[in-house]
Image (cartoon, rainbow, N blue to C red):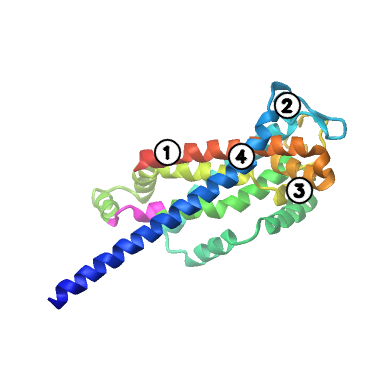
Amino acid sequence: MTITKTKGSKTIENKKARIALKILTYFISILIVFVFLLSFLPGLKYWSWEFFSSFPKDQMTGGGIFPAILGSILLTAVSLVIAVPLGIFLGIVLSEYNLSYIKFAVTILSGIPSVVFGLFGLGLFCITMNMRTSILAGGLTLSLMVLPVISSAVYEVMRAIPRELREAAYALGARKSEVIFDMLVPAVRNSIITVSFVSAGRVIGETAPLILTAAVFYATNLPRDLFSPVMTLPTHVYYLAAAYGTKARWMAEGSASILILFVILVYTIAFMFRREKK
């Protein structure tokens, strides 16, 4: 009788805990959606072909945001081209070889604030390596920032593969490189694609590193090469809010809504690959 009562009380407590967690989940979800809508909807009324395709004018209070859109896309592409291969390689090394000191370093890097990466990129790439304020300097800085994220994710999914599969492959005479690149990496391909898009979503919204390494306040020409500075959407919004306030609020709201749309699209694609993986 006592055992039955204990089980019944535990069942009731579990139900209460599930209900409380559901309520908390719904509340947080509604709050996130509200914040997104509050930032996204005000800028929709300023969308037009001219807004997307023209340069800023009238001291940043008129025109469009085409240089900022192009700059964000270029910086995201450059950073991912550098960070994704390095992150995959580092994740494979961490999962297949016992290198605890490298794992510790990656863990520390993942907790460093983005502005510190910006200062590091300013000192190393812009000044020491004489890249100046440029797409390449910003891309390298952003790639260092997301490298721990990619490598840690690859490490986790590689470690999740059962050890028996590796042992079976070795028993059949496969070399370590064949096991890694012919069996393990294809098995986690969708996870790697997912984390790449997640990293793109983080990169495209960064501001502090780009202010120090790649972004300019006002661009009248498109970048000629990787050593040219660019405008970006997050720094554009920051500059408008800091320098003009309510005078250019409409452009800041329009730019913010485009930035949020990009982030939503990138994370939606990542979620689609994650569902396919499941």
- CA distance separating discs 3 and 2: 23 Å
User: Based on the displayed image, in which of its 4 quarters is residue 225 positioned?
Assistant: top right
Of tags 1 and 4, the one toward the viewer is 4
Q: Cα distance, mark 1 to mark 2?
A: 32 Å
Residue labelled with disc 2: 51
Position in image of residue 59 (x %, y %): 87, 34
Q: Residue 79 at what x, y percent from top left?
A: 62, 43
Label of residue 260 in the image? 4
Relative to residue 4, is residue 116 drawn left or right?
right
Q: Disc 3 to disc 4, how far (Cα)?
A: 19 Å
Q: Residue at x 45, y 44 (%)?
A: 192
Which residue carries the number 1 mark?
273
Mark 4 and mark 2 residues within 8 Å of each other at the beta carbon? no
- The answer, for residue 227, to whether it is visible in the render is no
Q: Main secondary structure of the magenta part?
A: helix
Q: Quadrant of residue 275?
A: top left
The residue that mark 3 highlights is 211
